[in-house]
């Protein structure tokens, strides 16, 4: 018999940027406040307000939760993981969102008898447009993995990885990627202001352009390279700009390669007892 998401009790440790984005996205997708218990020492006002609607805040009323989401910083991971009672969480699916924290790190604290799924989502989950990459440990059943996929599909696209070693790469691309896009939008705004547009007009143009291009790339049957070529007339304005952006030595491709590699290497460094 399948597990209905709306019937599950979900405890979330940590309500920072990612934990908060997920809770907002899950509630927007139709889950109710009563489904959640959130453990957050310094809860934001919006989370406190949700506690008036049925969400359990810093409470132990969720005995034997079906899902436990760990959304704390790597530096806090060992403390939180060590608090997971092996009897209470014996049949609970542990979902770790902690960047760089491998199964071996997690199991060194909670043992190797618990079901664990590592997930790397990104902040657009708050508007149900995220992408979440998942990988399971050996103790996770097919039913539990399906449950993990179901709950993250509520807030966007899910991708199951082939191996844990891919997690650092997806952290650098989809996990950190929204910040790259926001940075690109910022640069478009500044360039537009430099060309004489007002900041408000520049922001409207840049945001709408990136949003529209992203939607077109998502729904089109064409490769993104072909979509780029469709905008680029020979000897036109776009070609002039792309000559700079696609410069083989210091263009956007090279910059993003260096940036994503830096994020990838940092993800590999993160883990228990590391800064």
Image: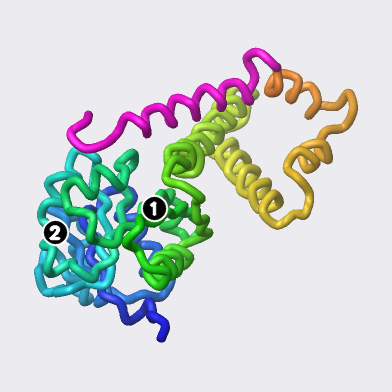
Identify the residue at the far bottom of this view: 1
107 or 170: nearer the viewer: 107
Q: In this view, does 64 lie to the left or right of 25?
A: left
- Residue drawn 38% across the image and 80% down it: 3
- Residue drawn 58% across the image and 27% down it: 193
Indicate whether 119 appears above or below 236. Answer: below
- Residue drawn 42% across the image and 51% down it: 121
Identify the residue at the far top of this view: 249
Q: How many labels does the image show?
A: 2
Q: Say few, some or many: other residues with alpha carbon within 10 Å of mark 1 (under 14 / 14 to 19 / 20 or more).
A: many
Q: Give whichever of discs 1 and 2 has the lower sequence position.
A: 2
Label of residue 84 in the image: 2
Q: Where is residue 29 in the image (x, y as percent from the top left)?
A: 43, 71
Label 2 secondary element: loop
Quadrant (top left/top right/bottom left/bottom right) for the C terminus? top left
Picture quadrant where residue 64 is located: bottom left
Gap in angstroms between the C-alphas marked 1 and 2 = 19 Å
Is residue 255 among the parts visible in the rendering? yes
Q: Position of residue 26 (x, y in %)?
A: 38, 67
Q: Name the residue under label 1.
A: 119
Indicate whether 255 appears above or below 182. Answer: above
111 or 222: nearer the viewer: 111
Label 1 secondary element: strand
Q: Position of residue 47 (x, y in %)?
A: 23, 61
Q: Position of residue 220 (x, y in %)?
A: 75, 54
In the image, which residues are magenta? 248-275
**Residue 263 magenta:** yes
Label of residue 34 in the image: none
Identify the residue at the far right of this view: 234
């Amino acid at each position: 018999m399948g597990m209905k998401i709306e019937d599950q009790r979900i405890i979330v440790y940590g309500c920072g940027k990612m934990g908060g984005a997920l809770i907002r996205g899950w509630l927007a997708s139709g889950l109710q406040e009563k489904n959640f218990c959130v453990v957050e020492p310094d809860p934001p006002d919006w989370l406190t307000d949700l506690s008036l609607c049925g969400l359990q805040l810093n409470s132990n009323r969720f005995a034997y939760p079906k899902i436990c989401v760990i959304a704390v910083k790597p530096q806090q991971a060992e403390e939180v993981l060590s608090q997971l009672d092996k009897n209470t969480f014996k049949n609970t699916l542990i979902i770790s969102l902690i960047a760089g924290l491998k199964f071996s790190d997690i199991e060194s604290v909670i043992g190797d008898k618990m079901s664990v799924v590592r997930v790397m989502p990104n902040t657009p989950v708050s508007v149900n447009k995220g992408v979440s990459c998942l990988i399971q440990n050996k103790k996770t059943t097919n039913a539990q993995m399906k449950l993990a996929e179901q709950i993250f599909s509520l807030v966007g696209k899910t991708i199951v990885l082939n191996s844990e070693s891919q997690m650092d790469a997806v952290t650098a691309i989809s996990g950190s990627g929204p910040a790259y896009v926001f940075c690109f939008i910022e640069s478009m705004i500044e360039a537009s202001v430099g060309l004489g547009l007002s900041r408000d007009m520049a922001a409207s143009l840049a945001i709408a352009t990136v949003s529209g291009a992203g939607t077109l790339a998502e729904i089109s049957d064409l490769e993104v390279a072909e979509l780029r070529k469709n905008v680029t007339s020979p000897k036109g304005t776009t070609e002039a700009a792309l000559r700079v952006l696609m410069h083989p030595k210091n263009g956007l491709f090279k910059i993003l390669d260096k940036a994503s590699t830096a994020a990838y290497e940092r993800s590999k460094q993160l883990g228990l007892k590391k800064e």
